[in-house]
Image (spheres, rainbow, N blue to C red):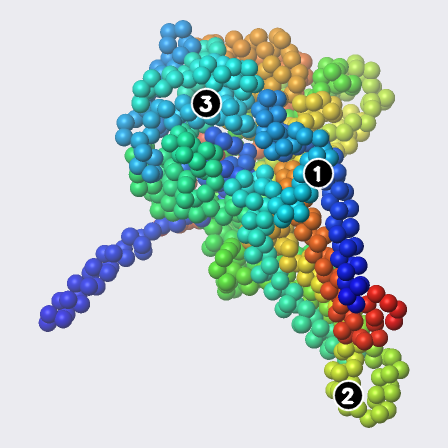
Amino acid sequence: MLAHILRRILSVAFTFIVVSIIIFLMMHSVPGGPFDANDMPVSEAVRARMMAQWGLDQPLHVQYLNYMWGVLHLDFGVPFQSPGETVVQLISRAWVPSLILGGSGVLIGAPLGILLGMAAALNRNSWIDYVASTVATLGLTIPVFVTSMLLILIFAVWLNWLPASGWPQPNRWILPIACYAAIPLATYARYTRSAVLDTLNRPFVTVLRAKGLSERRIIFQHVMRNSAIPLVTVFLPMFIGTATGSIFVEAMFRVPGLGAYFVSSIEVRDYTLQMALMLLITFMYCLAYLLSDIAYALLNPRIRVGGAE
Amino acid sequence: MNAFVRLAGIMVTATALSAPVLAQTTVVAPSGNTAGTYMDYMKTVYDRGTGSELLQIPIATFNKEFELTPMAAESWTQSEDGLTWTFKLRSGLVWSDGEPLTAEDFVFALQHAATSGYDFAWYWDFAGGIKGWKEVTESTADVSTLGLKAVDDLTIEVTTVAPKPYLPSVTSLWYPVPKHKVDELGDDWSLDVSTIVSSGPFEIESWEKSNNSVVLTKSDTYTGPWSPLIDRLELDPTLNAPEVGLPAFLAGDADYSFLNTGQVPVATQRYPDGIRKNAVFATSYISYDLDAEPFNDVNVRRAFYYAVDRDELTSTVLKDIAIPAGSILPPGYPGYNPDIAAEAVFDPEKAKQFLADAGFPNGEGFPDVEIWYREEGGYNGAIIPAMAQYLQAEFKEVLGITLNIRSLPGPEWMDGLRGKKNNIFIAPYEYDYLDPSNFYGIFYNGGRHGYFIPEFDEIVAKADSDSDWDTRYQLYADAEQLMIDQGLIVPLVHPVTIAVVSDQLTGDGVSPNSLGFTQLDRLGHYFFTHITKQ
């Protein structure tokens, strides 16, 4: 297991380097630069001075090596769009709201989804199953900006119970968290339902029933554990996807989070921030899959991490 | 009894102390979206911190009737040869940290802008015409050679390369920079709320950089004209999108909101007295690479000019958000000439004839072309994509040609326009100062289109430097006639923004001007100092 983890860490480093080269090349191959004119031309001398100031006048490979040398020392540079702070400071600042809202959304939505999915599986083809399937389908198909709008309309405009948007008062968190929770809730409801049904149909459940175990014990001790693997596969990547912010949810609810920076860093050719965000996401996904692998082994002793089942 | 008196005294004191807090009025308003790097308009315009212009006092600005009003300057005079302007500043102006605001701060602002990569530097060349500006920004001359001088603490002298009769209106974008702060902290002075100092009607209380929203407060030290009638102002760019702004307005979180076309009927029905139209003074037009086929033929360009039904465009797909444009100048803008604008008619037969004269009868043999437009938010984001599709259908129907559409990020689009990387564009332009030279200047001497029409340049140069308004008016009309005859552009529409305003918001700022327009966001100094909240 330890050797496997070490191998995975090495593969993370390799992935990291490959991704960084691809992103760096893609970033610089997009036409336009960070100091190109928006509306009227800037003088070439001015542009050249700005490029030199940020080290963008050097050959690409030198720029890349300089950047990666900094990354090795956890120095991701200074974002062009916020020169008063480092990239690390910017991300630490802007990630907080995204983490609070997106993280809470997953942490609330996932258990609710599991409950809903279990209820559906254990009451297959009943009204509970139909309601759960409808909720899950709606949650997955309605875009978040529509969900956001509906929540604002109902709870802020019609009922006047909550503020429509804004930050940082906690009563302003409720609607975006509800919005974020819809996706994990729907996803988990569907995954749990099919995983539980799948497990219920397996021969060992029949054996357990034949042994006379109570239905509750069968479900919670055996079925749930065996159904957990697909859920584990989904959880961490979903958590990362949501907790790094959504441009739509953050825009609709006026949350000063990280989501908008994913778009703005590309729009304004903020190379340092673009690289950092992409590397952050890469790192987190690598970490998520590594942790998922470990969790598999803990959940099912028959799975040997790095070996055959 | 004594206890009662004491209690009453305490209550009166407490009430008196808490009164200013209770009476505080806060206005929450949408704001234009910029990246929010520096809180200094003279460092960056396109990436400035929200409200940076409200923090400083310009030399002059416009009121809601678009009349130039002295602000930091109390008067100005032009020398006999027309080349030198002298601005006299008001006495008693100070920075919010108590330092006196002097002519040196204004001169320093432009000297610094010319040498520090200011993204609006072009303005002071083509609009300001300041002597030596081009050379200094191109690093071929020393900053000391600029035609700027602080004669004494209250006197600024500006020398221009040619007479600029409209220079005072150009100074509406001339804000001071605190030299004492730059000496101490460099450009970083405008990065942090704790080091930002202001000279204008507002001071900064907080700045959320993630979405570039700010909270400003009424300045205690400001002695210039137009002191705010409100205590606090929250400016939030995330409210600028009507899809976010209107729900927040309806929930009572914002004091006004801009509206998209779908929202206008609903808001009008619910708040009939709260609807306001804002003059943007902007024009969307078709621009070409004049050297590239097929638009190197004037007949093709003229065919496009007559193939657009602007009335249909603005009464259907752009209902309520744009009016037809017959001229590069919007109605109400100085120099607007209705006779010139009236030439831009929809005449399909004429359009077909011009196209046939170019060798493409009924569009036969005309190559497929791709029109490039710039991705953006705000009013242009609402107008341009829909307009591009309309033009696509219109040109197919009237001229029988295929027009493909491509949207590009701002810098890429600009690079395409300037670098002639495509042959046809939809180009939007919004005024920077109120003088016709502003709009004609974008075509002057290469401007932002990268082509040179010597005859046009000659007329515009004459018009720009003549001190007689009637002569200038005629010369600009001649310049525009030349643009029409040569088919340089196809004026399409002038955007109009519509907003809904809370009935709690009152004052001159929210009442329409004589043309029926309000200025909810463009004339910030006027608007935000002329509103009250009940």
- Rounded to the nearest angstrom, the CA distance separating label 3 from label 1 is 35 Å
Q: Foreground residue, B534 or B57?
A: B57
Instruction: Write down the chain letter for disc 3.
Output: B
Q: Residue pushed farthest bottom?
A: A212
Chain letter of the residue carrying label 2? A
In the rendered image, residues at marks 1 and 2 fall on the same chain: yes
| Disc 2 to disc 3, C-alpha distance | 82 Å
Residue located farthest toward the front when viewing the structure as drawn? A3
Quarter holding the N terminus of chain B is bottom left
Q: Secondary structure at mark 1?
A: helix
Percent x, y of residue B110: 45, 24
Task: Give x and y (percent) for residue A217.
Answer: 75, 87
Residue A186 in picture, x, y percent from top left: 71, 66
Mark 2 = which residue?
Answer: A215
Near mark 2 (Cα within 10 A), the count class, few <14, some 14-19 or many ≥20, is few
Have a look at marks 2 and 3 and say if they share a chain. no
Give the residue pinned by disc 3. Answer: B111
Q: Residue at x 78, y 18 (%)?
A: B293
- B354 with respect to A155 (left or right): right
